[in-house]
Image (cartoon, rainbow, N blue to C red):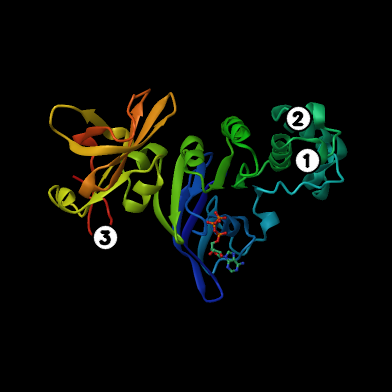
């Protein structure tokens, strides 16, 4: 079991208030991603759960038991770091086995567990190599192997893929997700990359300046962002925000339209604009359109659109996909 619950968790470093009251329930076996801009407190929140930092106030429950006074090694959690933190002088086998040796497990049991983890992670051929003889992705797998063999209640991942190149990140993203589903172990995963969050999570926690802005499934956050912050953070390219008369007419301080929810129309309707830049990706065309008082709008068209800078177009937002926000930036729900 690995249910993790936060109740009113606060953290200050000296006079600086970093985590401003976090309440959260991570279900056993789920994959939860903490996402938010740099400095919002993601790593701090993860380290509080791990026990590497003490809470200033509040409770952290693991399977119903408050662990705020329990040392990290006794919480039954395994952390995987961005830097891998492998021992350079030890083989892959030695690195994966290290925690189990420290626990004093019998040698044959250690070997069995290490070999099972290596097989799961496709590391069997590399068991006798040193970390420097491995690729970045293989090193990351060793770090994950070391976490797996301890059979933790939960894995805590701190930006584990950010040192890898783009292609390897996509591959490892799939591997980590597949592995977590196969093991059924609760996972909390920190990233600043909203695409990683959207693709890996069962549920996402969007953090901003030490506060949880919203907690929900990727599609919930995409379809029903609670406020301007979440609306702007989730989705790529970003949602367009429009203020002024066009928003007021719809009973909002701000309206939001995602780039993929525009149609280019030629029926005299729609918002007129001039193409500033057209990016042709083959699969999509991204347009940046000067729409006068409405500002510069980003438009995503599926497939190739043969438009070029200077072309005059008219944009019609899908009427069912216009988001409305009040003066405080909170979503207005119809
Ligand atoms: P990033 O994506 O850049 O890693 P993050 O969301 O993980 O950011 P944290 O590392 O949790 O952010 O840091 C949150 C804030 O707390 C930052 O402003 C940071 O400077 C501050 N902070 C973190 N650790 C300490 C510390 N030990 N002492 C003082 N301030 C700290």
Quadrant location of ligand 1? bottom right
Quadrant containing the N terminus in the rendered view = top right
* Marks 1 and 2 close (CB-CB < 8 Å): yes
Frontmost of labels 1 and 3 is: 3
Q: Secondary structure at mark 1?
A: helix
Horizontal and vertical percent position of residue 293: 21, 49
Residue drawn 57% across the image and 43% down it? 187
**Which mark is first along the chain, 3 or 2?**
2
Q: Secondary structure at mark 2?
A: loop
Q: Residues within 10 Å of mark 2 (few under 14, many from 20)?
A: many
User: Is residue 317 shown to the viewer in this render?
Assistant: no
| Left or right: where 70 falls relative to 287 | right
Q: Which mark is residue 96?
A: 1
Horizontal and vertical percent position of residue 75: 64, 54
Q: CA distance from mark 1 to mark 2?
A: 11 Å
Q: Which mark is residue 328?
A: 3
Q: Secondary structure at mark 3?
A: loop
State whether residue 85 is above or below residue 69. Answer: above
Frontmost of labels 2 and 3 is: 3
* Marks 2 and 3 close (CB-CB < 8 Å): no
| Left or right: where 86 falls relative to 272 | right
**Which mark is first along the chain, 2 or 1?**
1
Q: Residues within 10 Å of mark 3 (few under 14, many from 20)?
A: few
Quadrant containing the C terminus in the rendered view = top left
Frontmost of labels 1 and 2 is: 2
Q: CA distance from mark 2 to mark 3?
A: 52 Å
The residue at the far front in this view is: 310
Q: Is mark 3 within 8 Å of ligand 1?
A: no
Of residues 315 and 151, the one nearer the viewer is: 315
Q: CA distance from mark 1 to mark 3?
A: 50 Å
The residue at the far bottom in this view is: 15
């Amino acid at each position: 079991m690995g249910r993790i619950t936060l109740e009113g968790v606060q953290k200050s470093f000296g006079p600086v208030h970093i985590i401003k009251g976090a309440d959260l329930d991570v279900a056993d076996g789920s994959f939860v991603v903490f996402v938010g801009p740099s400095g919002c407190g993601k790593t701090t929140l993860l380290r509080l759960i791990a026990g590497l930092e003490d809470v200033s106030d509040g409770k952290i429950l693991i399977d119903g038991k408050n662990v705020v006074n329990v040392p990290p090694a006794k919480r039954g959690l395994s952390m995987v770091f961005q830097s891998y933190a492998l021992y350079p002088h030890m083989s892959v086998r030695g690195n994966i086995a290290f925690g189990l040796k420290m626990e004093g497990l019998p040698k044959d049991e250690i070997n069995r567990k290490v070999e099972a983890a290596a097989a799961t992670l496709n590391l069997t051929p590399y068991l006798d190599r040193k970390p420097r003889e491995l690729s970045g992705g293989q090193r990351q797998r060793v770090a994950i192997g070391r976490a797996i063999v301890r059979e933790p209640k939960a894995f805590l991942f701190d930006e584990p893929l950010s040192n890898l190149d783009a292609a390897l990140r996509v591959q490892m993203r799939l591997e980590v997700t597949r592995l977590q589903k196969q093991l059924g172990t609760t996972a909390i995963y920190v990233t600043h990359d909203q695409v990683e969050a959207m693709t890996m999570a069962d549920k996402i926690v969007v953090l901003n300046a030490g506060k949880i802005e919203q907690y929900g499934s990727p599609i919930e956050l995409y379809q029903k962002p609670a406020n301007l912050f979440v609306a702007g953070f989730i989705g790529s390219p970003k949602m367009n925000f429009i203020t002024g008369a066009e928003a007021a007419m719809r009973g909002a301080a701000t309206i939001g339209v995602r780039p993929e929810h525009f149609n280019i129309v030629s029926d005299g309707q729609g918002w007129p604009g001039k193409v500033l830049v057209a990016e042709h990706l083959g699969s999509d065309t991204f347009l940046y359109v000067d729409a006068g008082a409405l500002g510069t709008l980003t438009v995503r068209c599926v497939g190739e659109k043969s438009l070029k800078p200077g072309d005059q177009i008219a944009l019609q937002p899908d009427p069912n996909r216009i988001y409305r926000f009040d003066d405080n930036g909170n979503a207005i729900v119809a």
